[in-house]
Amino acid sequence: MLASAIQFPGRLRQRLRRRSKPGAVPGTILPGPTATAPVVRLTRYGTSEYHDETIEDLDSIPPRLNQSPVTWVDVDGLGDARVTTRIGEIFGLHPLALEDVTNVHQRPKVEMYGSYLFLVARAYRSGESLESEQISMFLGSNFVVTFQESGTDCFAAVRKRLEASTGRIRQCGADYLLYSLLDGVIDHYFPVLEQYGERLDALDERIAVRQERFMIHQIHTLRSELLSVRRSIWPLREAVNALIRDSGQLVSDETDIYLRDCYDHTVQIIDVIETDRETCADLRDFYLTVVGNRMNEIMKVLTVIATLFMPLSFIAGLYGMNFDTNVSPWNMPELRWALGYPFALALMAGTALGLLAYFWKRGWLS
C-alpha cells in the first residue's frame, strides 16, 4: 500500500486517516481496506549459522526464538489483524504500539517499553511519483520485529548481507541489525533526492529555453513533495538522536557509533531538502521573471504597432471626410488633385518610416 498515509492531490498535504472511531478501545487493531496480505519471514543467524524461511504457522515461531543468537521476524503487509496480534503476543508487544503499527500515519519516533523499544520510520522510493510507506521496528535483547506496509520487501539488501556474511552484521547482536535496517531506510532517501535534483535542473533548462504552460504547477508540486519528505526526515533525525541517547542497555556503545553515522545522514538529507526547496522558490521567481519579460516584449511590439498606426489612422480619417469644394467654404486642395491619393499614401509611409527611425534612434527597438 504505497503512499497510503500521505496523499498528493493538489498541494500534497499530509492527511491523517485513522480508522478507529472516536472513543474506541485503546489498542484496537484495524488494518486499512487496501492493506496487503502479510507474509511472515523468520531469520535466525549467528557467527556460523544463517536460517531464513517463510512462516505459515505462527505457532512455530516460539520454539525457535532461542535457537540462535539473533532472531528477526519480518511481517511484510498489514492486511490481517490476527497476524499482527499474534506476533505481539509471541514477543510481548504492547497493544498501543501494535495499534500504531496498523495506523500508518505515524510520525517517526522512538518509544521505550521496558525490555524493548519501538521505532517508527518512513521509507521513500524513487519513481515517477512520490511513494512512501511506514516501517515499524521492535528491538529486544536478542530479537528484532519489523512491520512493512507495502507488500514489497525493502530490506532485501540487508538480507543479502546476512546471507553472504558481508561486513560484521553476523558477528553483532540485534541492536546492530536494527541499525542496519534503519540505515537502509535512510539511505533510500538519497536516490529520491538525487532524482529531485535532476528534475530541478531539467526545469531550469526548460524555463531558460521556453515557457511551458504547466511549469509553475510542476515547480509547486516538487516543492510540496519535498516538504512531505522533510516532514518525515526531520522527526526521524530526532528519533535517531533519542535512540543514541536513551536506548539504555538495548543498544551497545559500539552500535551507538554507527547510529551517529545515521544521524549525520539525516542531517545531510535535511540540508539537501532545504537547498532543493530554495531552488524551487528561485525557479518559481525565475519563471515569473521570464514570463514577465516576454510579456513586456510582446507589449512593446504591440505598442510600437499601435503608435505607428495612430498617425496613419488620423491621415486616413482626415482624407476620408469627403468635403466638396463647391459647397464648403473651406478649400481642400487635394480633393480634386490627380496626385492626391499617391500623396496620401506617401505621407502615411513617410510618417511610419519617420516614427521607426525615431524609435530606433532612441533604442526602443533594440
Image: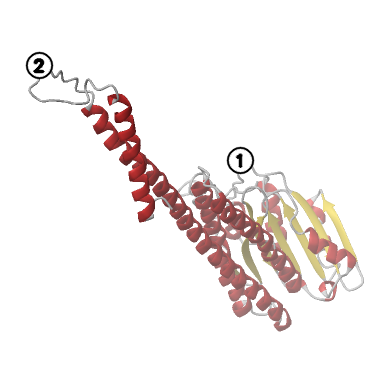
At label 1, the amino acid type is: Pro
Residue that lies at the very extreme toward the front in this rendered image: 338
Looking at the rendered structure, the kind of residue marked 2 is Val
Q: Which residue is mark 2?
A: 327
Q: Residue 115 location, x and y as percent? A: 66, 72
Q: Quadrant of residue 117?
A: bottom right
Q: Secondary structure at mark 1?
A: loop
Estimate the spatial distance between the alpha carbons at disc 1 and disc 2, rounded to whole Å.
Answer: 94 Å
Q: Residue furthest top?
A: 326
Q: Which residue is mark 1?
A: 33
Q: Is residue 318 above or below residue 326?
A: below
Q: Is residue 299 above or below residue 198?
A: above
**Left or right: 84 as drawn, with respect to 8:** right
Q: How many marks?
A: 2
Whether residue 123 appears in this view of the structure is no
Q: Is residue 70 above or below residue 89?
A: below
The residue nearer to you, when weighing 56 against 231, is 231
* Rendered location of residue 355, percent (x, y): 33, 45
